[in-house]
Image (cartoon, helix red, strand yellow):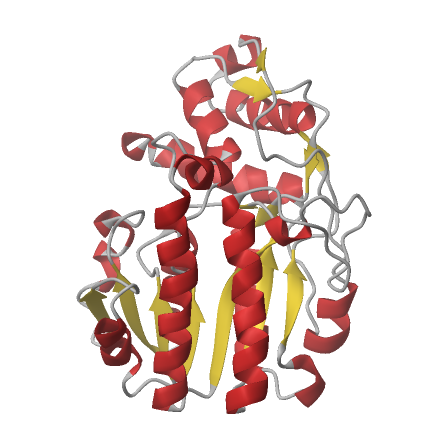
Amino acid sequence: MKKILITGGAGFIGSNLTEYFLNKGYFVRCLDNFATGYHHNIEEFLNNSNYELIEGDIRDLETCHLAVKGMDYVLHQAALGSVPRSINDPITSNEVNVSGFLNMLVASRDAGIKRFVYAASSSTYGDSEKLPKVEEIIGKPLSPYAVTKYVNELYADVFAKTYNMQIIGLRYFNVFGRRQNTRGAYAAVIPLFTKLLIQHESPTINGTGENSRDFTYIDNVIQMNERAMLTDNENAVNTVYNTAVGDRTNLMQLAGYIKEYLAEYDTEIAKIEIKFGPNRVGDIPHSLASVDKAKQLLGYQPTHVIQQGLKEAVRWYWENKSML
């Protein structure tokens, strides 16, 4: 039985990865401090004999050593996300995303982990205006969060070369789907808009609505993690990959899709107006990924475009309104 440590396993992406790999017969250990993860995301796993929870913080090296003990693979999802959060509190973002990441690399090195797959970020592209984004061309970071995720890539490259580790980074592009948090000041746009519309409130778009993103459904992200973890292609290791669909949607289109799909459950939602506010500091205007590298080296084939993913996500939020 293969054994996986998923850091941040009580979070949005981590809990979805946990569910997937438990269903495939893996042993899954979760490490989470519940700063941004939730107990309700993992309740259904607690009675599974192939699941183990360690409540702890990646900023503590001893905890990291304990978590990796006996594991074959690490899927490192633990991080403090959100550009605005990092602008408001750059020190904590750095402690978690850089020092915590380094602790996990050191612990994984010492434990002889077979492969370390980590959540990188499209924020690494920074002020590069080139579209689509290709892995080898990046710009300067535009936020403290982006700095931390770029430093992760630098550390990963050094550890792969210096300690002969197998490491793969996945540059996530605006991931969304079931279990994504709708609450708090740093909720992502899709769960936030969905919650507000269900509550018959008007969502506010930052800017004119023309800013666009490569919104990526959670099932595509799960596929990329699995392919990165298990690939036997030597040329596919010790690099980074865009984890996306390869298509972009602007915020006005996005709001329109969410209203349309929610109106199937509540026709009044179709009448709700969208508001507009100022652009957010640190935001890039457009984001679009090339996924050619992932297709070529990992055999990646995205299964969900934006409309398919949104329909599934909206249904999940509607069926779990009590969690909004």
- Where residue 298 sits in the image (x, y, percent)? 68, 75
Can the viewer see residue 21 in this picture? no
> Which corner quadrant of the image does residue 109 belong to?
bottom left
Pick the quarter of the image with the N terminus: bottom left
Q: In the image shown, does 220 or 77 lie closer to the viewer?
A: 77
Pick the quarter of the image with the C terminus: top left
The residue lying at 34 percent from left, 32 percent from top is 183
- Where residue 230 sits in the image (x, y, percent)? 55, 82
Q: Residue furthest front?
A: 91
Side of 84 relative to 290 (left or right): left
> Which corner quadrant of the image does residue 220 belong to?
bottom right
The residue lying at 64 percent from left, 69 percent from top is 240
Q: How many marks?
A: 0
Q: In the image shown, does 319 or 32 lie closer to the viewer?
A: 32
- Where residue 37 sits in the image (x, y, percent)? 30, 50
Instruction: From this view, report whether residue 306 is shown above or below residue 53.
Output: above
The residue lying at 42 percent from left, 44 percent from top is 90
Can the viewer see residue 45 in this picture? yes
